[in-house]
Amino acid sequence: MRVLAKTDTLAREKGFDHSFDLLREGYHFIPNRRHSFQSDMFETRLLGRRALCMGGMEAAELFYDNDLFKRSGAAPGMVRNTLLGKNSVQNLDGEMHYSRKKMFMSLMTTDRLAVMDEITIDQFEAALDRWEEQKEIVLYEEAKELMLRIACNWAGVPLWSHEVSLRKEDVASMIEGAASLGRKHWKARKARTRSEKWIGSLVEKVRQGVLSPPEKTALHTISLYRDINGELLDVHTAAEEILNIIRPMVAIAVYINFTALAVHQYPEEREKLKSGDEKQNLMFVQEVRRFYPFFPFQAAKAKQDFTWKGFEIRKNDLVLMDFYGTNHDPKRWGNPQVFNPDRFANWEENPFDFVPQGGGDYNMGHRCAGEWVTVQVMQIALDYLVNKMSYHVPQQDLSYSLVNFPTRSNSRFIMNDIVRKAQK
């Protein structure tokens, strides 16, 4: 790490730019400096401009104050062009954001989440039938296809068998290439262009009455959604938002990979899960989400000049909120580097101390609308891994990088000798 200095009011990292340090250090970039400065906020320079990085529960509460921060224009162009889309809900503020977010939350009703459970179980059953016939599988690759099938079914998006491979690789490329440079980045941009054309053509067919997806599905709802001005979204933006249902669900493959890794590496916890207790299952899933890396941080821009804990924050300052470091903050999580699901036994849910997919309020804020879907799918996946199938984990490289965004085990978790367990 480079030599660090401290101003009178705010810890500041010396040097002209630290973008390559961010790429080199990955998930540890912000936590390393928070530890060095003994401060929850510090100043650095990224992409040639001043940037403030912060983490911890109090910092998260500040970051998700919509009176102080906005998301419009905050995410780097490379992320907007691959992962989020240029006009998506993540890049909106004010009434436009609230209206669009309300539309997304309308897809997360109890009834629709119950449908999600049914689809997920059906797809796991079909997958398990296939896996029993194969000599071995690579779970991460299988999970990407599994989650694509689940996502499209739930979203009302038709997915033909001949296009599954292309669509899976395109959506996965958007996720895996979001923070990459060079060839991988351009592959992700081409994948997004193809995906937007695919979904955009479906939106047009819905509006023309040629295609009739079930009501309350994402394809139906978003295609016909009208904004605060009473206007339909343009086809490109509608396609972006439908992809913002499908893409995060495919990204759950990362968590399925880590769920399998945790089941394998912590056999004492696996024994507890054999009881089928729902609370034990949920505690394990939440600890997987806390312990393992997903996306490292989120960006915002200050709306105005203000001071927090004596730190001066100026209008339009770029601010990064540290997800990984907040979920491993020793001030909030005892022994954070230890995998311990029991820490969630008496946990009082807080929108700012546990932020694997963002923090704040679901309805009015920028917390991920799909977080409930993630938890439900992971719980079903966990039940299959522990109680509904037996398998062997051969020798392989189960380590994972804390540099790549997002990451997963290097071997992508190879399994063989898969057999369905007889149910009592």
Image: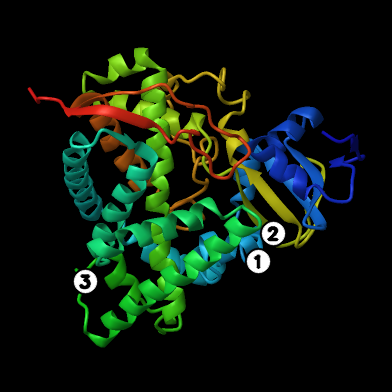
Q: Can you tell which quarter of the image residue 258 is in?
A: top left
Write the residue at 58% across / 45% down: 405
> Dot 1: few (<14), some (14–19), or many (≥20) neighbours within 10 Å?
some
As helix, strand or loop, the secondary structure at mark 1 comes to loop
Write the residue at 32% across / 50% down: 145
Residue 213 numbered mark, or none? 3
Q: Give, as a three-letter code, the residue at label 2.
A: Lys
Which circle's residue, 2 or 1, is located before the other in the chain? 1
Farthest residue, direction front: 135
Circles 2 and 1, Cβ within 8 Å, touching? The answer is yes
Distance between the Cα atoms at labels 1 and 3?
33 Å
Distance between the Cα atoms at labels 2 and 3?
38 Å
Report the side of 73 relative to 340 (left or right).
Answer: right
Pick whichever, 44 or 103, lies toward us.
44
Q: Is residue 10 visible?
A: no
Write the residue at 19% across / 68% down: 214
Where residue 66 appears, x then y in whole percent?
A: 59, 58
Q: Give, as a three-letter code, the residue at label 3.
A: Pro
Q: Can you tell which quarter of the image residue 326 is in?
A: top right
Distance between the Cα atoms at labels 2 and 1?
8 Å
Farthest residue, direction top: 268
Pick whichever, 267 or 102, lies toward us.
267
Quadrant the N terminus occupies: top right
Pointer 2: what residue? 301
Pointer 1: what residue? 73
> Dot 2: few (<14), some (14–19), or many (≥20) neighbours within 10 Å?
many
Quadrant the C terminus occupies: top left
